[in-house]
Image: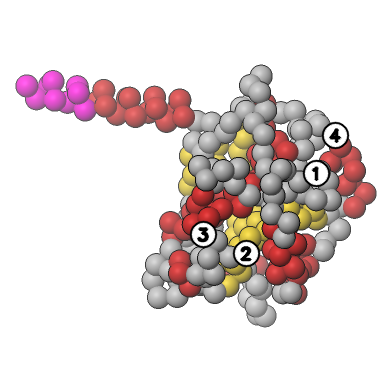
Amino acid sequence: MAPRTPVRTVIPTVIADPPDTPEDLYSSNLNFFLQTPWTASIIRSDDAVPLILQCRNPKSPLHDQLFGTTLLPDQAIPHMLSVMHLGGREQRKQQLDDPGRPIRSVSTLYHVGHGLTGGPGVLHGGMMTAMVDEAMGALTEVNSALGKTAEAFNGFSVTGALEVKFLRPIFTGTTVVVRARLGRVERRKARVTCEKKKKKKKNKNKKKNRGYVCWRQWPCVRVMKSIANDEITQKKRKRYVRR
């Protein structure tokens, strides 16, 4: 088994803060989302444990600079908070303490500024994809921080494949919640599904609040590489036949 990669996740109610964590990092983001009733209801639910992902708590100027520095200004993503869901108050202790029981659901809250537009007032699709990727990676990160024993939560993991379907536009100047759910875990591979939610409006059915569904499996670098090699081989064969 590969050595566990240290993570800088901030979960004050469960584990000690990593070294050099800014004092107000957790409290400032928590208080911001508590000011809005619909996001406060997510944070205050019985099965919720708020946390800050390590992408907002960089280890150095060479780590996690996209979300940790570049996207910090008010025009980008000034506030970001994650919440792991433990399945209820009664299961809380067992879910946290049992190394064989992984956390299966994490929601990440983003407040997106007007500097991330693609179309007029609409969040850029590439930015949305990056937000999805970060939210889905939270499952690996949180389980690693809590010492879960599955091989997928140990060592270094990367995104091997990411599919996003854009069904509705997301407007800037709003808060978006991306909820990731852990599916099957097979050694170093984990399958994760994800959906975007925003504030519900009256007379709108639940399906219309879904922004996308995507799938992630990691690490798939070798699989992706073999596919690329096959494509190159096919091209070489075609050139050879033409000659």
Q: Mark 2 points at which residue?
A: 79
Q: Residues within 10 Å of mark 4 (few under 14, many from 20)?
A: few
Q: What residue type is labelled 3?
A: Leu
Give the Cα separation between the discs numbered 4 and 2.
31 Å
Specify few, some or many for label 2: CA neighbours under 10 Å numbering under 14, 14-19, or 20 or more.
Answer: many
Q: Is the magenta stretch mostly helix, strand or loop?
A: helix
Q: Which of marks 2 and 3 is nearer the N terminus?
A: 3
Q: Where is residue 92 in the image (x, y as percent from the top left)?
A: 88, 47
User: If you read the primary sequence from the N terminus, does the residue marked by circle 3 or circle 4 appear first?
Assistant: 3
Image coordinates of residue 100 in percent, x first then y, are 80, 30
Type of residue at label 1? Ala
The residue beneath circle 4 is: 98
The quadrant of the rendering that contains the N terminus is: top right
Point out residue 23 in the picture as x, y percentages from the top left corner: 73, 56
The reply to whether dot 2 and dot 1 touch (C-beta < 8 Å) is no
Span highlighted in magenta in the image: 235-243
Please tell me which residue is depicted at 86% across the width and 58% down the height of the picture: 46
Residue 241 visible in the displayed image: yes
Q: Is residue 205 above or below residue 84?
A: below
The alpha-carbon separation of the residues under discs 2 and 1 comes to 22 Å
Which residue is identified by label 1?
16
The nearer-to-camera label among 3 and 4 is 3
